[in-house]
Image: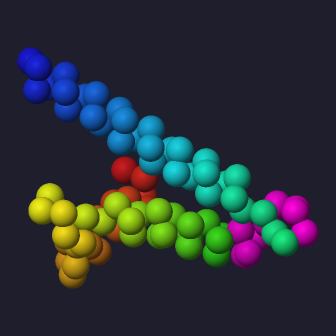
Amino acid sequence: MKRIFLAAVIATFAAGSAFAQDASCETKAVGKDGKPLAGAAKTSFMKKCTTDACESKAVGSDGKKLAGAAKTSFMKKCQSGA
């Protein structure tokens, strides 16, 4: 029972951080003139921002950076927000 509860708590925090990541990228999506980005510029910025945020989290259980298929899978999952 404790394991199920612990897993639920961890999943809740993980989902919260994924939503917070998108919110922080949204707030950073501002042009040099101070106006919010729109269209292709915003799409490009959001993709780069989420990739950069996920890149720093791509670390294995041994503390080393992920590589190959493991990194690809992690990045895909991280960027989808799941």
**As drawn, which residue projects farthest toward the top?**
1
Q: Is residue 35 magenta?
A: yes
Residue 6 relative to residue 48: left or right: left
Q: Nearer the viewer, residue 15 or 30?
A: 30
**Quadrant location, the N terminus:** top left
Q: Which percent across, then down, holds residue 32?
A: 84, 72
**As drawn, which residue projects farthest toward the front?**
63
> What residue lies at 39% left-to-right and 65% top-to-bottom?
56
Q: Which percent across, then down, holds residue 20?
A: 53, 44
**As drawn, which residue projects farthest toward the bottom?**
68
Where residue 17 sits, quadrant-wise, is top left
Q: Nearer the viewer, residue 18 or 28?
A: 28
Q: Is residue 42 above or below residue 9?
A: below
Q: Which percent across, then down, holds residue 8?
A: 25, 28
Q: Main secondary structure of the magenta part?
A: loop
Colouring rule applied to residues: rainbow
Q: Is residue 76 visible?
A: no
Q: Is residue 45 above or below residue 7?
A: below
Q: Nearer the viewer, residue 35 or 72?
A: 35
Where residue 71 sits, quadrant-wise, is bottom left
Q: Is residue 64 visible?
A: yes
Q: Is residue 1 magenta?
A: no
Count of marks placed on residues: 0
Q: Which percent across, then down, holds residue 33?
A: 90, 69
Q: Is residue 66 above or below residue 36?
A: below
> What residue lies at 19% left-to-right and 27% top-to-bottom?
6
> What residue lies at 70% left-to-right and 52% top-to-bottom?
27
Q: Which contiguous range is marked in magenta? A: 33-42
Residue 59 relative to residue 75: left or right: left
Residue 76 relative to residue 25: left or right: left
> What residue lies at 71% left-to-right and 68% top-to-bottom?
42
